[in-house]
Image (cartoon, helix red, strand yellow):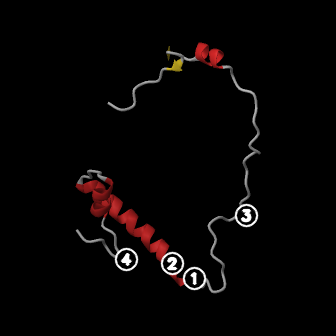
Amino acid sequence: MNTPDTDHIDVRYVAKLARIDLDEAEVTALQSQLDEVLAFVHQLDELDFEGVEPLSHPHPLENVFREDVVEASLEHEEMIRNAPGAVQQLVRVPQMIE
């Protein structure tokens, strides 16, 4: 299946990409909504962006993280006592890979 053009995007194509099953009523309703969204987005083509600097965020970003400061933590024995389970002085966690 070829990629649709930007003037019309078929809801069935998007649903297939998202692996969503839609019945005919849903396709009809969603297609009209998607067409309205695309028509609205195409209105941006009429705007003049000459001299407008592109930006990725409307406000200047700065580092919001605190300084990396070494602080005291739990002693190993206390941490093992607080763990829900331990084996050979290690914290036991649920198996993630079968």
- What residue is shown at x 27% (from left), y 57% (from top)? 16
Identify which residue, 46 or 76, lies in the foreground: 76
Query: Which badge, 4 or 3, is on the more N-terminal residue?
Result: 4
Q: Is residue 85 above or below residue 58?
A: above
Amino acid at pointer 4: Asp
Identify the secondary structure beneath mark 4. Answer: loop
Quadrant for the C terminus, please.
Answer: top left
Look at the numbered discs 1 and 4 and tell me whether their residues touch, using CB distance below 8 Å: no
Q: Which residue is labeled 1 in the image? A: 47
Quadrant for the N terminus, please.
Answer: bottom left
Identify the secondary structure beneath mark 2. Answer: helix
State how far apart marks 2 and 4 are (Cα). Answer: 12 Å
Res. 60 mark? 3
Look at the numbered discs 2 and 1 and tell me whether their residues touch, using CB distance below 8 Å: yes
In the rendered structure, the answer to whether residue 67 lies left or right of residue 85 reads right
Q: Residue furthest front?
A: 88
- What residue is shown at x 68% (from left), y 19% (from top)? 75
Amino acid at pointer 3: Pro
- What residue is shown at x 76% (from left), y 39% (from top)? 69
Q: Which residue is labeled 2 in the image? A: 43
